[in-house]
Amino acid sequence: MNLLAVALAALVGLFLGGLINLLLYRLPRQRPLFRRPHCTRCGHPLGWEALPLVGYLLQRGECRHCHRPIPRFFPLVELLTTAAFALLTARLSVRDGGGLFLVGLYAFFALSLILTLFLDWQYHDIYYIILIPTTAVALLGHWLHPRLNEQQSLLGLAVGVAFFALLFFFGQIIFRDQALGLGDVWLAGMIGAMLGLPGAALALAGGMLLAGLSAGLLLLLRRKSTGSYIPYGSYLCMATLTYLCLWAP
Ligand SMILES: [Zn+2]
């Protein structure tokens, strides 16, 4: 393992994590993306305080202007992107010479997954503006690295969409339930295009299992009623991210 490459990748992941946080805050509010960062509580313009992780740690988790807590998902997102980039580089780049393109592709997938995970979790919404370009990159990825196979990507896309469309219609007709949204169906397609088979089947099954387990646990703890929202998309992204970083060939 090339330690310098892993450290560099972690640093790039850390800064892109800061960028993901900007998107995460501004996309749902339709704020301009390219503007100086501000405190999300008091609106004070930020300088070094906006540095990923460092700003959070140096301010001890609260804005130094208004002293209100900084939302915990900010450092969480930055930690996740850092860990994902470091893991992918440690696992893939040394094994074959042309690994840089593969790491780049997987890192791009990881960013889309992390963004979608938190958007669904916090705003209960899946953004096609993220799904469509990522699916396109996954389908064209074989031009960058032969590990991504064109037929596998197409097959994964078709199986993901078909299986989740079935679940969606069953949910609507039998349970009259909006548990799965159409966004989840296209998200399953994107995951299929990224991983092909059998990777996508494993990741999607893992996501459904995670969603079921956490829904059961929350019901047991009586934190949730049977009708409350379950961010299926977030669980699918969690499982896919884990598979991508730890096992994807
Ligand atoms: Zn503030």
Image (spheres, rainbow, N blue to C red):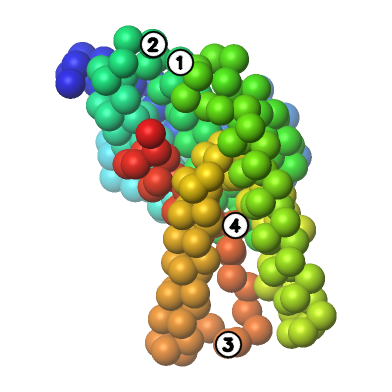
Q: Which mark is residue 219?
A: none
Q: For the residues carrying marks 2 and 3, which lies nearer the camera in this image?
A: 2
Q: Residue at x 53, y 45 (%)?
A: 197
Q: Residue at x 50, y 61 (%)?
A: 205
In this figure, which residue is indicated by the disc labeled 2?
A: 98
- How far apart, in angstroms, are the residues tagged by discs 2 and 1? 6 Å
On the image, the x and y values in percent for residue 241 come to: 44, 45
Q: Residue at x 59, y 15 (%)?
A: 143
Image quarter hosting the C terminus: top left
- How far apart, in angstroms, are the residues tagged by discs 1 and 3? 46 Å
Counting other residues with Cα less than 10 Å from the Cα at mark 3, is it few (<14), some (14-19), or many (20 or more)? few
Q: Amino acid at mark 2?
A: Gly
In this figure, which residue is indicated by the disc labeled 3?
A: 225
Q: For the residues carrying marks 2 and 1, which lies nearer the camera in this image?
A: 2
On the image, the x and y values in percent for residue 244 come to: 42, 40
In this figure, which residue is indicated by the disc labeled 1?
A: 101
Considering the numbered disc 4 on the image, is that residue within a helix, a strand or a loop? helix
Describe residue 184's horizontal placement relative to residue 244 as left or right.
right
In this figure, which residue is indicated by the disc labeled 4?
A: 233
- How far apart, in angstroms, are the residues tagged by discs 2 and 3? 50 Å
Q: Residue at x 25, y 17 (%)?
A: 94
Residue 191 can be seen, yes or no: yes
Pick whichever, 245 or 249, lies toward us.
249
Question: Contact, CB < 8 Å: mark 2 with mark 1?
Answer: yes
Q: Earlier in the sequence, mark 1 or mark 3?
A: 1
Q: For the residues carrying marks 2 and 4, which lies nearer the camera in this image?
A: 2
Q: Amino acid at mark 4?
A: Gly
Q: For the residues carrying marks 4 and 1, which lies nearer the camera in this image?
A: 1
- How far apart, in angstroms, are the residues tagged by discs 2 and 4? 32 Å
- How far apart, in angstroms, are the residues tagged by discs 4 and 3? 19 Å
